Image (cartoon, grey):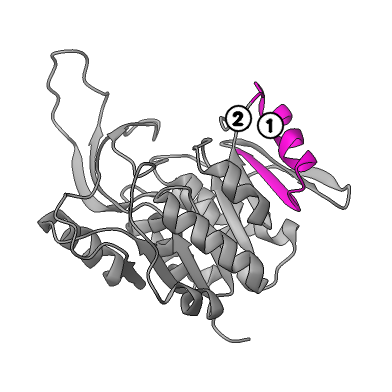
């Protein structure tokens, strides 16, 4: 089977990660046990995972000319991700996230900016990027890029995986083009108050395949064919949960790109995310993906 190509559309940030015994309180300073610097963001992290699994990953985002952008680009390219910058002349710094990770539990606290109000416009060759892709994953940031990619991919018959970590204004325009919607347990469609209610509302809207991840809880799934079920993740010792959901999405997208079933996509996503949380830092865990590589 040829190498799958995934187009990832969305946010790329610079993540500054500090591992600590406990997060600082108000007006308190703590000493970091370890510090890491890497590209972050839902689409970017999923693209890194896809590439580590053996796929060709392309990230469509907006970085620009600020020195911070060069750090993000260098990390992504070092991990096999081709970056397509929709705003190469942008002078403004890309988003930066400050993250504290509690070493004993792997839980994290994040302060950062996003790109839901970005005005970046799609590149002229977007249709060519879509045509060479086996799957398109969209996280809802950079809304003009997201809507254009979703529309073109849907029209071309390319599977569209929508990362619905939280409901963003553009989601209403993206859901109709999605073949797969992967929600976090905290995501809520407008007018709903529970994960189950949100899922049912999206299914009523015609989403072909819908998945809800719940951290250590079972992954729930539904299809328009009327089937549903749940798959429990293994019990592991988590030391760093940052990007676990993004790793799930990268694995899920890889399975979709290689024509895996819904169950196979969820199982690969679970396996990859479970591996990710067992390793400290944003990149060291990737070397342990060899058993899943094609």
- Identify the residue at horizontal 76%, vertical 53% (top origin): 208
- The image position of residue 289, as x and y in percent, is 47, 65
Q: Which residues are magenta?
A: 191-213
Q: Mark 1 or mark 2, which has the lower sequence index?
A: 2
From the viewer's perspective, tell me whether residue 186 is left or right of residue 14: right
99, above or below 25, in the image: below
- The image position of residue 123, as x and y in percent, is 37, 69
Crowding near the residue tagged with mark 1, few <14, some 14–19, many ≥20 C-alpha atoms within 10 Å: many
Crowding near the residue tagged with mark 2, few <14, some 14–19, many ≥20 C-alpha atoms within 10 Å: many
186, above or below 256, in the image: above
Q: Is residue 202 magenta?
A: yes
Figure quadrant of residue 228: top right
- The image position of residue 294, as x and y in percent, is 55, 78
**Label total for image:** 2
- Identify the residue at horizontal 39%, vertical 42% (top origin): 116
Mark 2 lies on a secondary structure that is: loop
Q: CA distance from mark 1 to mark 2?
A: 5 Å
Label disc, if present, on residue 188 of the rendered structure? 2
| Residue 156 at least partly seen | yes
Q: Nearer the viewer, residue 40 or 158?
A: 158
From the viewer's perspective, tell me whether residue 179 is left or right of residue 245: right
Mark 1 lies on a secondary structure that is: helix
- The image position of residue 76, as x and y in percent, is 30, 65
Q: Are marks 1 and 2 in contact (CB under 8 Å)?
A: yes
Q: Nearer the viewer, residue 199 or 131?
A: 131
Direction right: furthest residue: 226
Return the residue at label 1: 198
| Residue 55 at least partly seen | no
Figure quadrant of residue 114: top left
3, above or below 71, in the image: below
- Identify the residue at horizontal 48%, vertical 71% (top origin): 290
């Amino acid at each position: 089977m040829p190498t799958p190509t995934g187009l990832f559309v969305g946010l790329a940030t610079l993540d500054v990660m500090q591992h600590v015994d406990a997060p600082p309180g108000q007006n308190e300073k703590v000493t970091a046990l370890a510090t890491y610097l890497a590209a972050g963001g839902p689409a970017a992290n999923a693209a890194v995972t896809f590439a580590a699994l053996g796929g060709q990953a392309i990230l469509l985002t907006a970085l620009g000319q600020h020195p911070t952008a060069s750090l993000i680009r260098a990390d992504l390219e070092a991990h096999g991700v081709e970056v397509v910058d929709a705003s190469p002349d942008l002078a403004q710094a890309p988003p930066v996230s400050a993250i504290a990770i509690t070493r004993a539990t792997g839980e994290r606290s994040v302060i950062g900016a996003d790109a839901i109000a970005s005005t970046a416009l799609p590149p002229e060759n977007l249709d060519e990027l879509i045509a060479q892709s086996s799957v398109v994953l969209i996280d809802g940031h950079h809304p003009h890029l997201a809507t254009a990619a979703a529309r073109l991919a849907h029209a071309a018959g390319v599977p569209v995986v929508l990362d619905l970590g939280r409901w963003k204004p553009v989601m209403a325009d993206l859901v109709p083009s999605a073949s797969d919607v992967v929600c976090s347990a905290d995501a809520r469609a407008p007018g709903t108050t529970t994960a189950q209610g949100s899922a049912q509302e999206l299914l009523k809207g015609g989403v072909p395949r819908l998945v809800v991840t719940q951290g250590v809880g079972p992954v729930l799934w539904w299809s328009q064919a009327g089937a549903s079920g749940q798959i429990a993740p293994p019990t592991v010792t988590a030391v760093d949960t940052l990007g676990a959901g993004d790793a799930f999405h990268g694995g899920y997208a890889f399975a979709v790109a290689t024509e895996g079933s819904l169950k196979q996509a969820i199982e690969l996503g679970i396996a990859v995310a479970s591996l990710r949380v067992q390793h400290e830092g944003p990149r060291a865990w990737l070397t342990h993906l060899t058993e899943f590589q094609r």
